[in-house]
Image (tube, grey):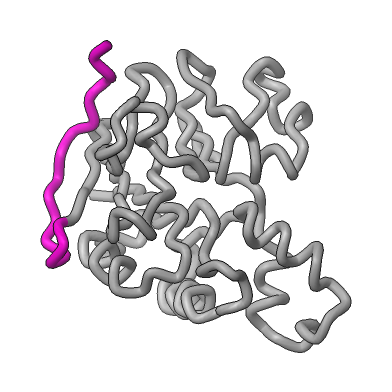
Amino acid sequence: MPHLYAMSDMHGEMEAFEHSMAVVDLSDPESKLIFCGDYMPPPDGDFTMIREIMRLQDEHPGQVVALMGNHEYRFVEEHRFINYEDDPAFQWMKKLPFYYETPTQIFVHAGIDEEAGDLWKWGTSEEDMCEMFPWNEGKFLKDVIAGHTGTYNMAQDESFHDVYWDGASHYYLDDTTHKSGQIPVLKYDTKHQRYTAFSFDSDGNAEEYEPEPPRR
């Protein structure tokens, strides 16, 4: 049964990344893994995780999608003519797409201009797709899956670092890996059209749960 998996804002946290990858099953050739950007640890310039994602793309052709995040976007802009032109990882970064679309979903790093409606592709600049703030909530034409922002902001709970669902069309992947030590994973069952998510404890043990709308 095919599934879609998404994670974002890994920021070079390789141990947490390994824990998250352990729940990803790409044995079905129709399953996909979408990375929603921000792969390097600050200060940017460490390509370790990028090279691992490149390896995964080679290992699973057509199943692993990597999107542009604001860290990649800024790094490319600032180093376009400096020392990196012969580095395959830098060339890979330059070619990253800004969104990935399915019939029912839009995966993006930060967000889209939802006021543009079905013209969102043309109404949203590449910079906004990477850096849009604040986040959107409410009903949209498709589900929007994004990262970029700490989900504790949306949940209004400093201890919250899981996937946040607004109860309508938005699923946000937490960007505070450096604080939480985990990279949440969103999973979508394409047959039953059902979302679940994974959180991880300090030992990397996974717990699968259904995101719940906020109670306010």
Residue 136 visible in image: yes
| Residue found at the very far front of the displayed protein | 158
- Image quarter of residue 127: top right
Provide residue 71's location: percent of width, then percent of height: 63, 59
Foreground of the two, 95 or 181: 181
Residue at 31% across, 36% down: 158
Q: Is residue 83 left or right of residue 202?
A: right
Residue 190 visible in image: no
Taking the magenta stretch, the answer to whether it contains residue 202 is yes
Residue at 55% across, 40% down: 101
Provide residue 82's location: percent of width, then percent of height: 84, 80
Foreground of the two, 50 or 200: 200
Q: Which residues are magenta?
A: 201-216
Q: How many marks?
A: 0
**Principal secondary structure, stretch drawn in magenta:** loop
Residue at 30% across, 63% down: 26
Q: Is residue 127 left or right of residue 143?
A: right
- In the image, residue 18 sits, relative to residue 3, either above or below, namely below
Residue at 49% across, 31% down: 144
- In the image, residue 54 sits, relative to residue 113, either above or below, namely below
> Considering the image in quadrants, where does the C terminus appear?
top left
- Image quarter of residue 28: bottom left
Provide residue 184's location: percent of width, then percent of height: 30, 50
Provide residue 190's location: percent of width, then percent of height: 31, 39
Taking the magenta stretch, the answer to whether it contains residue 185 is no
Foreground of the two, 93 or 106: 93
